[in-house]
Amino acid sequence: MRQVLGFLGFIALVQGVLGLVARFADLDRGLVRRLDFLDGYEVYASVALIVLSFALFAAAESRRSR
């Protein structure tokens, strides 16, 4: 479970950073840019993904490895 949470945290971090870079560099990359219902809220969604990734990393660290 620890590895799954770490992997999901990494994916969320990459997508969040990619969303911010895409927004400010006017690129068409990342999951956030491709979701139509987030139109106009790309920055907020990207920041939320970055915060979620840190929460997932913290949850992964709190899990005991067996």
Image: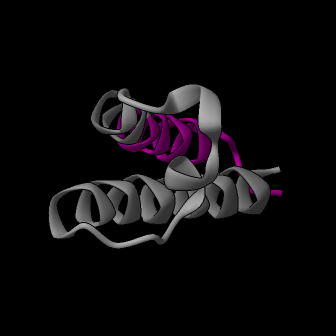
Give the side of residue 37 with respect to residue 19, left or right.
right
Q: Is residue 6 above or below residue 42?
A: below
The number of numbered badges drawn on the structure is 0
Residue furthest out toward the left: 24
Identify the image's colour scheme: rainbow, by chain, secondary structure or one colour.
Answer: one colour
> At which x and y percent is residue 21?
25, 65
Residue drawn 61% across and 53% down?
Answer: 34
Give the side of residue 46 with respect to residue 39, left or right.
left
Q: Nearer the viewer, residue 61 or 6?
A: 6
Give the side of residue 12 with respect to residue 20, left or right.
right
Q: Quadrant of residue 64?
A: top right
> At which x and y percent is residue 14?
46, 66
Characterize the magenta stretch by its predominant secondary structure.
Answer: helix
Q: Is residue 26 magenta?
A: no
Residue drawn 67% across and 64% down?
Answer: 7
Q: Is residue 33 above or below residue 10?
A: above
Q: Quadrant of residue 66?
A: bottom right
Q: Is residue 59 magenta?
A: yes
Residue drawn 50% across and 53% down?
Answer: 33
Q: Which residues are magenta?
A: 49-66
Q: Is residue 5 above or below residue 14?
A: above
Q: Nearer the viewer, residue 46 or 34?
A: 34
Q: Nearer the viewer, residue 19 or 36?
A: 36
